[in-house]
Amino acid sequence: MARTQGSHSDITGPKVREAALRLFAQQGYAAVSMRKIAAEVGVQAGALYNYTPDKQSLLFDLLRGHMDELLAVRAAQPVINDPVAALEEFTRFHIRFHAKRPDAVFISYMELRNLEPENFINIEGLRRDYEAQLEAILQRGMAEGLFQIPDPRIATMAIIAMLTGVNTWYSAEGRLKLSEIEEIYCDMVRMAVEMK
Amino acid sequence: MARTQGSHSDITGPKVREAALRLFAQQGYAAVSMRKIAAEVGVQAGALYNYTPDKQSLLFDLLRGHMDELLAVRAAQPVINDPVAALEEFTRFHIRFHAKRPDAVFISYMELRNLEPENFINIEGLRRDYEAQLEAILQRGMAEGLFQIPDPRIATMAIIAMLTGVNTWYSAEGRLKLSEIEEIYCDMVRMAVEMK
DNA sequence: GTCTATATTATGATAGAC
DNA sequence: GTCTATCATAATATAGAC
């Protein structure tokens, strides 16, 4: 049986999220109208409401999806017992995962303030879960006498800020390949925490 | 001679910039209307145009003022020749300066994309000038055989990201005083670059 | 599922009275 | 210098035809 003309639910849905992600990252949530998203997708504004109840849900779904994927990919990773090896693996993982998703990372940091309170708490919780994984590695390394860390909680925030900062300047056409960047950060992170 | 009723140029001007800074940081440039700024100041929207030609100039002036102050305060600092001492001073300076101006720091990173191209280039140039100061310290330390740094340009970006990251979680009512935080970051930065 | 049309509200900026 | 009033647009979201 032939499809109803103009019926593209399975294609349009993802396209809406992709367009919203790209536009929110480029211009900011508040600066992007439903009309702009619709134009990018190639439909009229009204049609978007088949895919999201409102603009806020669109933003929340993007952030939630990003965090869910981050945690899911981490959870599927094999556990590494040696703290030194685990720290290196975390460093490489973080850089690689985030470098591949610059738009999602950008809005995850920049548009938190545009989430309604309930949604904000939700995303913040997921972020804390992720941070806790790094902190656990640092704690283990200290317990085993391998790491020398003035304050593990602060070191966690410092390392994550440092690694996520790659996204502010990284370009696939830049001076360094991603694997080289990973290497450099692994060195710096190791030097910053290892016992002398 | 009595003043014209309702004439408060010298008071209202700064109040407009303060209100805009606070609101832009809290809600984002695009989400803040001239009416919201006016309400915060306690005037009508039309009155704002006595203090700024348009909304874009208001944003640019805030970012420009922030960067100018950053560079001016740095320029007034005495030069430190020893790279180790200079790096510690830079670390403490950066944390202290930025912790005191969370709103300005926030919009300096978040609202760059809302600057018109010419204004964007202007601010980016000032930021590069600031980064160059840290990179020069790292280069000097390497030349003198004091620092071991895989890539000075990347180390510069990494350290600045790490230090600026303090602003995402620092609170005056938090577990640690700012002086303690400075101390911890000095340790981590030193450990990350010093020759073993 | 998408379209057109529309209700309702808000926007940046300006003009002119005081 | 500030106010009120207004212009010209643009916003989110919905209703109903197809």
Image (tube, coloured by chain):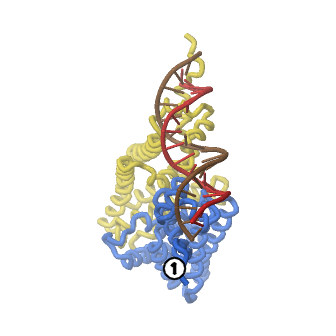
Chain colours: A yellow, B blue, C red, D brown
| Picture coordinates of residue A143, whole percent (x, y) | 29, 65
| Picture coordinates of residue B159, whole percent (x, y) | 51, 70
Crowding near the residue tagged with mark 1, few <14, some 14–19, many ≥20 C-alpha atoms within 10 Å: some
The residue pinned by badge 1 equals B90
Residue beneath the point at 35% across and 72% down: B172
- Letter of the chain that mark 1 sits on in the rendering: B
- For the residue marked with disc 1, what is the amino acid? Phe
| Picture coordinates of residue A88, whole percent (x, y) | 45, 58
Is residue C12 positioned above or below B183 on the image? above
- On screen, residue B169 versus residue B193, left or right, reads left
Query: In the rendered image, which quarter contains the N terminus of chain B?
Result: bottom right
Q: Secondary structure at mark 1?
A: helix
Residue beneath the point at 57% across and 55% down: A179
| Picture coordinates of residue B151, whole percent (x, y) | 59, 68
Closer to us: A170 or A76: A170
- Say whether residue B17 is visible: yes
Looking at the image, which residue sits at the far right? B118
- On screen, residue A136 versus residue A160, left or right, reads left
Residue beneath the point at 56% across and 89% down: B78
- Say whether residue A73 is visible: no
Closer to us: A152 or C16: C16
